[in-house]
Amino acid sequence: MSAFSISSPFDGGNVEVVDASDPANVRLRIRRDAGGRFLQWFYFRVSGARGVPLVLHLENASEASYAGGFRGYSAVASTDRERWLRVPTSYDGRALTIRATPGADAIWFAYFAPYSLERHADRLARWQRDPRVRVEVLGRTLDGQDLDLLTMGEGARAIWILARQHPGETMAQFFVEGLLERLLDDDDPVALGLLERATFRVVPNMNPDGSRRGHLRTNAVGTNLNRAWLEPSMDASPEVFVVRERMHLTGVDLCVDVHGDEELPHNFAAGPEGVPSFSPRQAELLARFRAAYAEASPDFSSDAGYPPTAAGEANLRLCTNYVAETFGCLAVTLEQPFKDVARHPRPLTGWSPERAAHLGRAALDVLARIADDLR
Ligand code: ZN
């Protein structure tokens, strides 16, 4: 019988052990992101618990950035690190309590299925074997990691796809993986047509440091990158600085910034309605984007989401608003749930990497319909 233990000093890991002496009453805390403001993402391994009924309390869950998101939420667990299943979880307004009886010696628990930097590198290596793909390091993060840009396509339209400005929103990178797999499928006529009409620039992981450190929302020095677009700096937000700089060179005809939402059980697109120069043309493109997506995937809701920001009230520090205002184009923040989806729920997995990838693939049907009208 191996010793019962809990650990998290690995890529994306996040938990503090208060007391693990009793498997039926394990006391844990979620570590705060750098900067001290945010917490919610957790990811840890429990060892030596085969057949042992575990009761795990995340005692500071009520201090989480979106504590309300823990209501109606179930954590994910995996013993093979490939398939992540939902496990019984409850939130009493203070602690988040997870219950499981592992069928294996080691089991991993997380807020959502993790997407590691090794997986990021593996996919990058696979995709660059396609001669149509260029991989480029746009710059270095504050922890010294590479910020990768993938470029593909020959067309005039400049389409940018970003994911994981908020590193804990791993579903965003699963979405991008699905999108890229389809875009590079040379048997797919929708993909072939799009690559003729547009040039795609994709940053699959905008925040490698926060990803590796197990953060919910910030980079290595505590910057919320999706509030840094108006005045990025190489000291506090180099990730945004270098991407924004490249955008100004290439121009932007469409930017899809992919995220996850802790509370809402829907997939939806938030638009730039509140930017000062929001035009009827942008409004029409936004409506067409949403309608086309709802047709392309039943997982997308054209009528769910945040109430639109009032005219002129948009926060230009957000990517979507900054890009829409600066380039006069369509820009959207695409949100997916951490929980299960309200429509076609699947309690065993909840919203999952597989469904995120499907939603990413469906994005190409949307782009195919609007690409010619983006500029
Ligand atoms: Zn986000």
Image: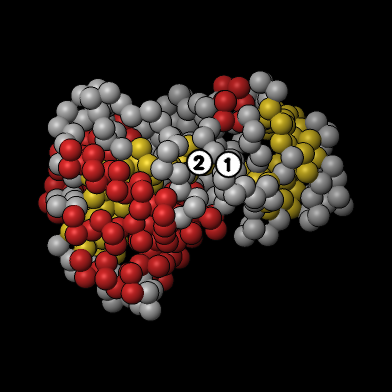
Q: CA distance from mark 2 to mark 1?
A: 6 Å
Residue linked to disc 2 = 266
Q: How packed is label 1: few (under 14 Cα within 10 Å), some, or many (20 or more)?
A: some
Determine the image quadrant of residue 202: bottom left
Q: Is mark 1 within 8 Å of ligand 1?
A: no
Q: Say whether disc 2 or disc 1 marks the residue closer to the N-terminus.
A: 2
Q: Position of residue 318 (x, y in %)?
A: 29, 33
User: Label for residue 241?
Assistant: none
Q: Nearer the viewer, residue 164 or 176?
A: 176
Q: Nearer the viewer, residue 260 or 149?
A: 260
Q: How packed is label 2: few (under 14 Cα within 10 Å), some, or many (20 or more)?
A: many
Q: Position of residue 200 (x, y in %)?
A: 26, 60
Q: Is residue 294 visible?
A: yes
Residue linked to disc 1 = 342
> CB atoms at circles 2 and 1 under 8 Å apart?
yes
Q: Nearer the viewer, residue 53 or 160?
A: 160
